[in-house]
Image (cartoon, rainbow, N blue to C red):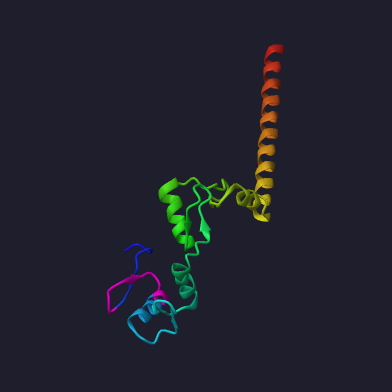
Amino acid sequence: MHSNEPVNKCDVCGKAFKFKSDLKEHNFVHTKDAPFKCDVCFKPFGVLSKLKIHLRVHTQERPFVCQLCNRSYIQRSHLKQHLTRQHGDSQPRCELCNKTFQNSLHLKKHYLSKMHKLKLNKDKEAEKSNEEMSEIKDDDSNNEINAIEMS
């Protein structure tokens, strides 16, 4: 079994969840004692944040917008799926840690973060050190060639 496979199954409908907390939240769908209900369609929710997301269905609010084609989505996860399926992996990506960003401005800010400043400085120092070592080796080989020519 892979670690990403859901292992917590609902006894009522058989739906599987990766996390036990998600199953617990789901169980409210089958009961009438859910702590939160939609005022429009009366759908039950175990967590207030899920109800707030659901309300966007009724209000038509779509705060997550694709920067490439302007399609909008109710949830961030839906935007991420869209980006992968429709645009491939065309989001700007950090070459140091492989993280993706909505746009190049966010990527630039990420590069300027303390963690990457340190890594970039270390990489530059290592590159400089390698160049210096290369120059020393070149000088040594030139000295050997000069010594051979003199003899």
What residue appears at the point 69 percent right and 46 percent down from the top-left corner?
121
- Give the residues drawn in magenta, as a range: 11-22
Towards the viewer: 92 or 57: 57
* Quarter of the figure with residue 21: bottom left
* Quarter of the figure with residue 45: bottom left
Q: Residue 31 at what x, y percent from top left?
A: 34, 84
Q: Which part of the image, by quadrant, shows the N terminus? A: bottom left
Towards the viewer: 46 or 18: 46
What residue appears at the point 61 percent right and 52 percent down from the top-left corner?
106
Give the answer, above or below, for where 44 lies relative to 141.
below
Is residue 12 located in the magenta-colored stretch of the structure? yes
What residue appears at the point 68 percent right and 42 percent down from the top-left corner?
124
Q: Residue 91 at what x, y percent from top left?
A: 52, 48
Residue furthest to the bottom? 33
Give the answer, above or below, for where 72 lies relative to 120.
below
Give the answer, above or below, for where 109 lies relative to 12.
above
Give the answer, above or below, for where 108 lies relative to 52.
above
Q: Residue 12 at what x, y percent from top left?
A: 27, 79
| Residue 89 can be seen, yes or no | yes
